[in-house]
Amino acid sequence: MAEGRGNRQHPRNLQGVLQMAVEAGSASDGPAPPEPMTQERLEFLRGALAEVCKGQMDEVEQMKQCLDVLNRDERREGEEEEEEEDEREEALEMLSELCENLDNARDLMKLGGLDLCISRCLCHSEAGIRWRAAQLIASCAQNMPEVQFYLLNQGALLTLLQLTDHDANSTVRVKALYAVSCLVREQDVGLRDFLSHDGFSVLMRGMQSDCEKLRTKSAFLLLNLLSSHPEHKDTVLSMGMVQQLVSVLRSPHSSVHEHVLGALCCLVEDSPRGVSDCRDPSLGLEELLNQRVQDLRGQEESQEELEFCERLRAACFQGQPLEDSGMDR
């Protein structure tokens, strides 16, 4: 076995280095002492780790170069101005890619990149800059509480909600809402900010948009927040949300309907007011649900939507309590 290990080629990448470390650790668990590390092997490990560290430093330098591009004064005109905008867009895309690495997201925050993104890029006159800036914020905030707190303290959520609600470009609105979701899902401070800025009303208006992606993402975030924080359902009910959701259900069938039905299930669970709102004869919800159940039966791809329909119908019109809205699946 020792001879086999001695003849084995050294790994050429980080994955190989980790595998070598695992094997070395495994060898020490056995009754025999571990094989002494050769000078060649030791030098290889040192070189490989140096390359990893160099790669990390190279990425920090790349981020600094991107920030230099974004910090330039906008003084060019004509074709030069278009070229400058292209460079800014490329810089933002590079930063988004780099910041999928959590360490890079933290470094960008320390370099002042997030401040620049909020103060200059989110409010830029070019839609391509605005949506890429929102995408960068989402990339940095995902699964990073430290970055989330920083962005919230800088007032990013209000700006993103305003973009979601009012921007003339549909891509900006969709990307901004995605960034909002990264700041409020599973983040209590973000949710409080969201409530203080009337975020549920933004979602309501998003579901009434002409943009299919915005409608779907708005309904999905509403469903997620209601299932995770049922204590806020009275606030949502007081806004007339049931009536708005039912009106969305009457639009041509699309993927948004599954999320809307899920949200209605949340609103009626343990809520006499929610059930009462759904039973309003002027909504015609019972007839709508009966028809939808017939339409969806036998469609394998619509089983979850069918289940929501049946649960909602049972809770509101057949006197059966909604014990499980299916949100935890």
Image (cartoon, rainbow, N blue to C red):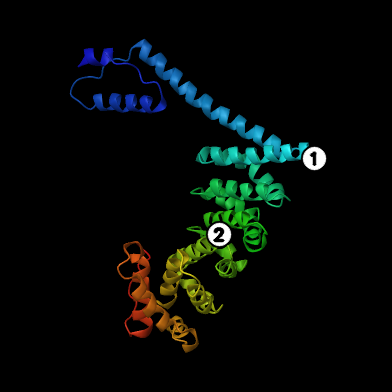
Q: Name the residue nearer the viewer: 191 or 71.
A: 71
| 153 versus 285 height, above or below | above
Residue 260 x/y as whole percent: 46, 70
Q: Residue 29 carries which label?
A: none
Q: Which residue lies furthest to the left in this view?
A: 31
Q: Quadrant of residue 108?
A: top right
- What residue is drawn where x is 77% and y is 38%? 79
Question: Which image quarter holds the N terminus?
Answer: top left
Q: Which residue lies furthest to the bottom in this view?
A: 281
Q: Do the residues labelled 1 and 2 touch (CB within 8 Å)?
A: no
| 203 versus 187 height, above or below | below
Q: How far apart are marks 1 and 2 (CA)?
A: 41 Å
- What residue is drawn where x is 31% and y is 63%? 300
- Can residue 325 be seen in the rendering of this structure? no
- What amino acid is found at the position of numbered circle 2 in the picture? Gly
Residue carrying label 1: 78
Residue carrying label 2: 190
Check disc 1: other Cα within 10 Å, few if <14, some if 14-19, many if 20+.
few
Residue 189 x/y as whole percent: 55, 59
